[in-house]
Image (spheres, grey):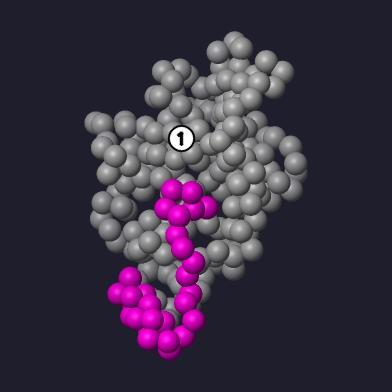
Amino acid sequence: MSYTDDELLPISALQHLVFCERQCALIHIERLWADNALTVDGHLLHKKAHDNSHELIDGVRVARSLWLVSRRLGLVGQADIVELHRDGSVVPVEYKRGKPKRDRSDEIQLCAQALCLEEQLETSIDRGFLFYGKRKRRTAVAIDASLRDQTGAVIARLRNMIDRQQTPTATRQPKCENCSLIDLCLPDGQRFRNGVAAWNQRQFAVAAGDDAPLTDSYDFLSAEAN
Ligand code: SF4
């Protein structure tokens, strides 16, 4: 199977899916987006990493903002940093705000990047790193069979959800408090329960001057929500 350009899904969606299926659907099916303090912080951190430069540091070629694509998996995205070492090893490094999460979403995103790089560079990758803003140091991640299996399963779930074009109903969870989409999702169940139709209605009201807009512009490929 080789996916076409139009069929490629953003790697960032994997992280959204692991965090919350509804959040993923709101962003990647209904095209809704809103920032909160956590996402703004994340954007700033990524802006620093995404300066499109390449440099040689202690014999390691460091490539920033490298575009990644896997036709086999149907994924596209951008790596914060890819290190090309003298011994031929290729190492992706992803920057994250805060500290390691309870779920494996960051590892899965990193693994998906590694899978893309393996396909693009015809190599094999056995490790990557996550750099957390709060810790200010790297955490090594083994790109092993277990992480590859988990990543493959999340990719399959994402593909399935996008193919079905169905947004799951909201279920209130503790993590909703940290979700930038809480005002659009309304997990306690209110105006936007019906998804995009209700959202459209809201936007017409905004256009008519009835209320202030709820969303900012949405960057499909680089969106990183929490
Ligand atoms: S508010 Fe809660 S249920 Fe809604 S998208 Fe966010 S995490 Fe998911």
Magenta-drawn stretch contains 155: no
- Quarter of the picture containing the N terminus is top left
Residue 84 image position (x, y, % from top left)? 58, 20
- Identified at 32% across, 46% down, the residue is 159
Q: Could you say whether the residue bearing mark 1 is in a helix, strand or loop?
A: strand
Using the rendered image of the protein, determine whether residue 174 is visible from the camera's viewpoint: no
Q: Is residue 197 magenta?
A: yes
Location of residue 135 by image quarter:
top right
Q: Which residue is mark 1?
A: 67
Quadrant for the C terminus in the image = bottom right
Q: Is residue 162 above or below residue 117?
A: below
Vertical placement of residue 33 versus 197, above or below: above
Residue 16 image position (x, y, % from top left):
47, 53
User: Which amino acid type is marked by label 1?
Assistant: Trp
Highlighted magenta segment, given as a residue range: 196-224
Is 119 situated above or below 13?
A: above
Q: Residue furthest bottom?
A: 210
Q: Is residue 217 left or right of residue 166?
A: right
Q: Residue at x 49, y 29 (%)?
A: 114
What residue is shown at x 44% (from left), y 23% (from top)?
Answer: 118
Residue 13 shows up from this direction: yes
Q: Residue at x 64, y 44 (%)?
A: 48
**In this orientation, which residue lies closer to the viewer: 1 or 49?**
49
Residue 15: image location, x then y, percent: 49, 48
Q: Residues within 10 Å of mark 1 (few under 14, many from 20)?
A: few
- Where is 191 relative to 176, above or below? below
Q: Residue 216's x, y, as percent?
A: 49, 67
